[in-house]
Amino acid sequence: MAVYNKKRDLIFHQAFNISILAKGLDGILEIIGGVLLYLASQPRIEKIIVFLTRPELSEDPRDFIANYLVKLSHSLSISAQYFGAFYLFSHGAIKVILIYFLFKRRLWSYPVMIVFLFLFIVYQLYRYNYSQEFYLILLSIFDALLIMLTVWEFRRVKKEI
């Protein structure tokens, strides 16, 4: 039985590390995206979206995601652009800072991460009610799994210290 627990513990620990590493990389990309969104002009954003979706739309003109992005780029207001930039930057910065402290095994960072992930889930589900964008459900499921792994890792780290 002890071997099983050690094996399970190792799997959970590795899953936790991989998950927070993925969240950290996502956070870095969000910071970069937030800065770029803030600095980009409306016509530039439209050109980038059209350029990025052109190959997919030439292959499948009815592609839901590509068409949605093109439509969104045409109707993006300056206030929505700045809100998006602020949201991406702050969301990414919070993730990167917390993940740094998680890798440093600072005990306070585990409950703070759990609270922020919970708040992200609440916000994502709130947005889903208005947008019906399925990726928000997927993000929420991933964040819920990361909450469970963070709780497990927090308990494990507390026992070691």
Image (cartoon, helix red, strand yellow):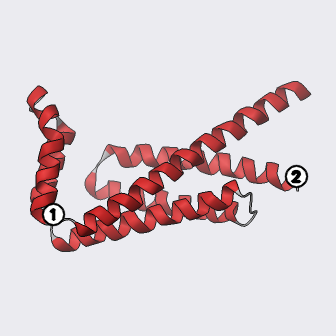
Residues under labels 2 and 1: Cα distance?
Answer: 50 Å
Q: Position of residue 85 (x, y in %)?
A: 31, 67
Q: What residue is rendered at 12% in x and 38% in y?
A: 54
Left or right, 147 with respect to 123, comes to right
Q: What residue is rendered at 33% in x and 58% in y?
A: 33
How many neighbours does mark 1 have within 10 angstroms: few (below 14), some (14-19), or many (20 or more)? few
- Based on the displayed image, in which of its 4 quarters is residue 161 positioned? bottom right
Residue type highlighted by circle 1: Leu
Q: Secondary structure at mark 2?
A: helix
Q: Position of residue 30 (x, y in %)?
A: 39, 57
Q: Residue furthest bottom?
A: 79
Is residue 114 visible from the viewing direction of this image?
no
Q: Secondary structure at mark 1?
A: loop
How many neighbours does mark 2 have within 10 angstroms: few (below 14), some (14-19), or many (20 or more)? few
Front residue of 68/95: it is 95
Residue type highlighted by circle 2: Lys
Asked if disc 2 and disc 1 are in contact, CB closer than 8 Å, the reply is no
Front residue of 161/152: it is 161
Is residue 129 visible from the viewing direction of this image?
yes
Left or right, 154 with respect to 41, comes to right
Q: What residue is rendered at 48% in x and 65% in y?
A: 93
Indicate which disc residue 12 carries: none
Q: Position of residue 143 (x, y in %)?
A: 53, 49
Front residue of 55/83: it is 55
Position above or below: 1 against 105: above
Residue picked out by circle 1 = 76
Q: What residue is rendered at 57% in x and 64% in y?
A: 97
Position above or below: 81 against 12: below
Left or right, 126 with respect to 70, comes to right
Instruction: Pick the quarter of the image with the N terminus.
Output: top right
Residue picked out by circle 2 = 159
**First-in-chain label (2 vs 1):** 1
